[in-house]
Amino acid sequence: MMEIKQLRSTRRFLALACLSTALIAGSVVTSFAQAALNFRVYSSLPGDDSSAHYIWFTRFQENLNKNEKLKGQIKLNYFANGMLGKEADATQQVRIGAINMMISGTSIWATLVPEIGVLDLGYLFKDYDQVGKTLDGKAGEQLSALMLNKANVMVLGYGYNLGARNVYTKKAIEKPEDLKNLKIRVLPVPNFIATLNHMGAVAIPMPGGEVYSSLQMGVIDGVEHDAPTIYSSKYYEIIKNGTLTRHSFNPLMIAMNKKSFEQIPEALRADVLAAAQEATEYERQQASQKEQEAIKNLEAKGVTFRETDRAYFAQQVQPVWKAFLDQYPDMKPIVDEITAAAPGDKS
């Protein structure tokens, strides 16, 4: 009789043990299923509202957090100020997936996908409305396909930088010829270098982190950039002249490694893309306002802004267009689509 009781007790113990094991196993499986994806997001600019990158990022993060399906599923780790290395090196890291996402101007991607340099042709765009209209259409689709095929990245959106790129110098530029032989820092990408050279300057490519000290030491005479970056980088402490060349309205690109995107459960991908699209629309709305605020702030710091003969400069850079399209003839339909969408002449 005692043996029967012991047998029953043993069976109950084994049953409870099996149930407990099953519950623990189920809990582990559930925790793995619910574990958040950790994505590293790169930006070369400061992590504040002076940066178009950060404006897009914070809105995207808000969109993920307020979506019940996405909440807690994706953790974004934002690395501002080039904390993960130089921007040109970061493109390679995104390509292989060591960095999951990158927010940057399109220009730097020309180091991997030379055709994307079409967007850096001087005086290609007249305003950001033209940028949005064309990149939301066929031109944007074709460029995104190139990025996927050649750089292994998905383009989640094309935003706007915070205003046109202008030339800022120590010396006043009273007429276009005054730019001749001035050493101007440019992004280290081919069409930016060629554009400034054909405008008459001596283009000096260098990383952003070296610009301030180079201005101080006289290595360069000026820089071309958008007004909010000039303000947030405090270049106004050295350069007091802004010439409204508006030579480039190069767009923002939000690029994500393809395999990183595919880590997102398929049922959630459409929501992630929708969150990115809304963040892009929101960021675009902020761009013009931020530019005007920065120009006023720069004027308050003693920077004088001058208009210039943009039609003259636009003519000077035409050889850059020809050389680029001779090398990449497949880009001509994109150039034609963009120029056809131009607003009335604002030069």
Image (cartoon, helix red, strand yellow):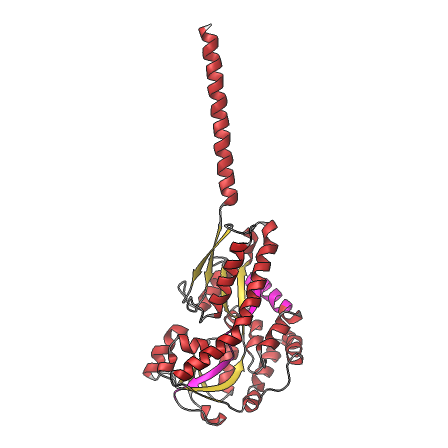
Determine if the magenta segment contains residue 337.
no
- Residue 196 appearing in the image: yes
For residue 67, side relative to residue 167 (left or right): right
Note whether residue 154 is visible: no
> Residue at point 46% right, 81% down?
295
The part of the image, by quadrant, that contains residue 183 is bottom left
Locate the C terminus by quadrant: bottom right
Closer to the camera in the image, 113 or 2: 2
* Residue drawn at 48 percent across, 29 percent down: 21
Range covered by the magenta-colored residues: 141-170
Taking 228 as reference, is 279 above or below it? above
Q: Residue furthest left?
A: 217
Instruction: Say which quarter of the image contains residue 80.
Output: bottom left
Which percent across, then down, holds residue 298?
41, 81
How many marks the image carries: the answer is 0
Q: Is residue 39 above or below residue 327?
A: above
Q: Residue at x 47, y 66 (%)?
A: 54
Vertical placement of residue 123 versus 70, above or below: below
Q: Quadrant of residue 203?
A: bottom left
Q: Residue 10: x percent and y percent?
A: 46, 16
Q: Position of residue 74 (x, y in %)?
A: 50, 52
> Relative to the observer, which residue lies in front, 90 or 56?
56
Q: Magenta segment: does it hold 156?
A: yes
Residue nearest the observer in this picture, 139 or 112: 139
Q: Where is residue 307 drawn, in percent x and y?
A: 50, 90
